[in-house]
């Protein structure tokens, strides 16, 4: 190990997490791994609350906690800043409202020492549902994958956010200049798609080491939701460029294109309650050609996909026709049920009501 370096850099962005940050940092320091083996880089992203007062208390106790201050620029830039200051051979991005499981650092340390040739280690998340208190271990169907591509194509949710699940060899990220895309929501999905495709070696740590907090979901402002949608389209275009540069000509080109199409599909899925709103209509009017055109282009290569995947693409290639028809069918069914109930309560024939005789 080089002088002034360590085994692992844990990067923790800080912004409006005063209720959670003490639990996060305590979980890192309540471990058995010696302090000299790792460092914690707390990136203050211009947080306006009292989070940094708590972080400063930890910094006075632990010499391996480094504070980096910056003006508020968002999660992506905070992570990139933390990485620029990292001195560890491996890097782990930990969100400040999450926390590590007991003995997690030793599990990670022992696994990496056993497989020093591996570039990326994928952990299994403990899903902590704040609203219900439910705890659920993430289901990963294929634990014996050997590369990022294998992990991406065989595990459905692998590329969908939560970069906290990964521990990276620093030289791997540097080799491909892998950084988070600034100024967008869903930055994890953009990063993970590129990262996994480029990772020639990946190993899963099957023992859960990370508690992923799923916060109580309040109502998201319409303007913010539309920003998310526009960002997903922007991310799709970036990933399409990546596909043309790094994936085209490979056997898994169309499989990768289908994976990243989820970005466009999610613009509809995330807004399913607002599909008929004025805001969504404007968004869809501006991006309909991309959403439909890309789905239809993929359907030209239907032989590359499963039947379920083809049906998935057909849904978006014909949107919003199917949704409109479904809404009309449901509306008719509800009317019919109400008439049946009325007929039952009034002890009259349903046929008489439907013919307008009552």
Image (cartoon, grey):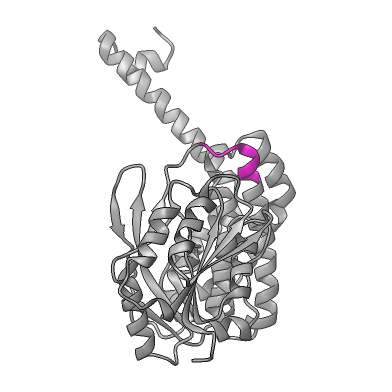
Instruction: Please give the name of the residue rendered at 43% of the width and 50% of the height, measured from the top-left corner.
Output: 20
Q: Is residue 81 left or right of residue 356?
A: right
* Outermost right residue: 286
Classify 160 as above or below 91.
Answer: above
User: Which corner quadrant of the image does residue 308 belong to?
Assistant: bottom left
Near-viewer residue (316 or 157): 157
Q: In this view, does 26 lie to the left or right of 313?
A: left
| Residue 291 seen anywhere in this rendered image of the structure | no
Classify 47 as above or below 86.
Answer: above
Indicate whether residue 104 is drawn in magenta.
no
Residue extent of the magenta highlight:
219-226
Classify 37 as above or below 293.
Answer: below
| Residue 288 seen anywhere in this rendered image of the structure | yes
Instruction: Please give the name of the residue rendered at 35% of the width and 57% of the height, measured from the top-left corner.
Output: 127
Residue 196: percent from the left, percent from the top?
52, 77
Residue 246: percent from the left, percent from the top?
65, 82
Instruction: Please give the name of the residue rendered at 58% of the width and 67% of the height, measured from the top-left corner.
Output: 260
Near-viewer residue (226 or 261): 226
Helix, strand or loop: magenta stretch: helix
Quadrant of image for the C terminus: top left
Near-viewer residue (323 or 51): 51
Question: Total marks drawn?
Answer: 0
Residue 199: percent from the left, percent from the top?
52, 83
Residue 101: percent from the left, percent from the top?
31, 65
Indicate whether residue 224 is drawn in magenta.
yes
Near-viewer residue (311 or 106): 106
């Amino acid at each position: 190990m080089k002088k002034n370096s360590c085994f692992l850099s844990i990067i923790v962005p800080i912004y409006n997490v005063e209720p959670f940050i003490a639990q996060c940092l305590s979980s890192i320091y309540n471990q058995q791994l010696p302090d000299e083996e790792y460092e914690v880089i707390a990136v203050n992203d211009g947080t306006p609350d009292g989070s940094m007062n708590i972080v400063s208390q930890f910094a006075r106790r632990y010499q391996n906690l480094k504070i980096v201050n910056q003006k508020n620029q968002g999660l992506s830039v905070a992570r990139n800043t933390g990485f620029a200051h990292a001195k560890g051979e491996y890097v782990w991005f930990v969100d400040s409202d999450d926390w590590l499981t007991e003995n997690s650092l030793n599990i990670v340390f022992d696994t990496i020492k056993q497989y020093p040739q591996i570039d990326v280690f994928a952990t299994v998340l403990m899903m902590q549902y704040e609203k219900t208190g439910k705890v659920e271990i993430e289901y990963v169907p294929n634990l014996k994958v050997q590369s990022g591509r294998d992990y991406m194509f065989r595990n459905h949710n692998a590329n969908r956010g939560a970069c906290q699940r990964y521990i990276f060899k620093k030289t791997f990220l540097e080799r491909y200049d892998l950084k988070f895309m600034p100024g967008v929501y869903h930055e994890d999905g953009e990063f993970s798609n590129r990262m996994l495709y480029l990772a020639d070696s990946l190993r899963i740590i099957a023992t859960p080491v990370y508690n992923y907090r799923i916060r109580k979901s309040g109502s998201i402002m319409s303007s913010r939701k539309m920003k998310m949608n526009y960002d997903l389209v922007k991310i799709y275009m970036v990933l399409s460029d990546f596909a043309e540069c790094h994936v085209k000509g490979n056997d898994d080109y169309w499989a990768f294109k289908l994976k990243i199409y989820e970005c466009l599909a999610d613009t509809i899925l995330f807004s399913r309650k607002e599909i008929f709103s004025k805001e969504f209509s404007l968004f869809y009017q501006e991006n309909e050609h991309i959403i439909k055109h890309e789905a239809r282009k993929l359907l030209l290569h239907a032989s590359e996909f499963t039947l379920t995947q083809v049906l998935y693409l057909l849904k978006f290639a014909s949107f919003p026709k199917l949704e409109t028809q479904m809404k009309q069918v449901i509306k008719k069914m509800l009317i019919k049920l109400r008439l049946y109930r009325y007929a039952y309560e009034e002890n009259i024939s349903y046929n008489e009501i439907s013919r307008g005789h009552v």
